[in-house]
Amino acid sequence: MLSKNDKIEIIAPALRMLSKCKSCQPLVKFTPESIDGAAKIDIADDSSQQDIINALKKEVKAKDKKVAAVAVDGLGCFEVVCIKNLTGRVAGKIAVVTGAAQGFGLEIAQALASEGAFVVLADINDTSAEVEAGKLRKQYGDNSAMAIKINVADGESVKAAITEIVKTFGGIDVFLSNAGVLRAESVKTQSEKDFDFTTMVNYKGYYLCTQAVSKIFAVQHEVDPDYMSDIIQINSKSGLEGSSKNFAYAGSKFGGIGLTQSFAMELIADGIKVNSICPGNFFGGPLWSDPDNGLFVQYLRTGKVPGAKTIEDVRKFYESKVPMNRGCETGDVMNAVYYLIEQKYETGQAVPVTGGQVMLH
């Protein structure tokens, strides 16, 4: 028997697909309160997903004009909110970015919002994520962004976050699995705790997020067979080649590409494209530049760069490895993100964005 949250995660995305039109991009907002004039849908306790979708289709098609809201006894109401005049490469798409409170994830979310997406900043640090989401709402409008707390390594946290996103926006179109951690150390000395932490977030977290969001995508594709969605994992060049004294991170990223290929094979039946992007070193972000625990500090501390005496020595060493003589920037990654979303004939790929540092064989 479907739970209340299960029903919400079917009704809202299905109604959003059924409400699409050329003049606006619909959001569907759930409320437990009643809405005057809402169309009433009867759903039995033992209804299946297909039963619910069929009931919605019947009600929507029976109306001469668009359904403004749908009410379900014992559950609540689903209000259709049409947003007009959106422009940009991802206009009207609902995009979730994990690890979006700072660094790469934040800049990805900001870029998506600037191109017309409704953006969800998902992070374990929900306080900072909300501050950043507030800035986006002030710039792009009240519906442009929301923040949600998520621990990608915890299945219940992931499920709860997806449910809240669906209650707020009505569905998801693009899921960027960006949250990641790194503990750099020799295999001779790294603690089991640090290895497990890296693996849980980078590898298991990607699986848990894909499992949860794929169910929403499948509903949307069932309602509209032409609809396609995207799961994009922000991987790393370390997912394409090994990394000395950084084995836990590289291993989790290698594994992530294996997940991408496997997910892509299975989920295309639901219109879901799954790809990875493998950026080079993002020197400007906190992963590298954090003064207390960034990679420059970690690599200097562990002696990974022979002869390095300062953080600047470590930075110059890594910049010299890139044929284009600079680190990866957010704009470089966004070009790959937009390509994967717009390219309808590609799935299961690991796209390098490394300035030539890693070249495919």
Image: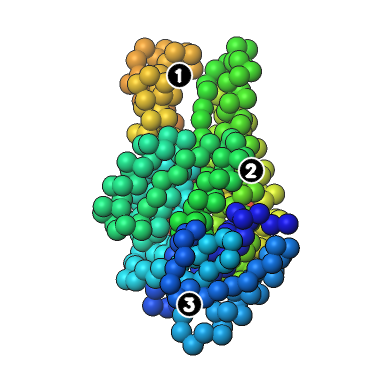
| Residue lying at 36% horizontally and 42% vertically, measured from the top left | 130
Find residue 207 and name its label: 2
Q: Are marks 1 and 2 in contact (CB under 8 Å)?
A: no
Residue most toward the bottom? 64
In front of the other: 45 or 330: 45
In front of the other: 230 or 189: 230
Q: Residues within 10 Å of mark 3 (few under 14, many from 20)?
A: some
Secondary structure beneath dot 3 equals loop
Q: Is residue 128 visible?
A: yes
Query: Which residue is identified by label 3?
Result: 67
- Of circles 3 and 1, the one toward us is 3
Task: Tell me if 18 is positioned left or right of 144 in this view.
Answer: right
Label located before the other in sequence (3 or 1) = 3
| Residue lying at 73% horizontally and 63% vertically, measured from the top left | 46
Q: Residues within 10 Å of mark 1 (few under 14, many from 20)?
A: many
In front of the other: 47 or 99: 47
Decide: is 68 above or below 134. below
Decide: is 283 above or below 161. above
Dividing the picture into quarters, in which one does residue 307 lie? top left
Q: Is residue 20 visible?
A: no
Where residue 159 sits in the image (x, y, percent)?
59, 46
Where residue 257 sits in the image (x, y, percent)?
62, 43
Q: Amino acid at mark 1?
A: Tyr
Task: Tell me if 2 is positioned left or right of 305 in this view.
Answer: right
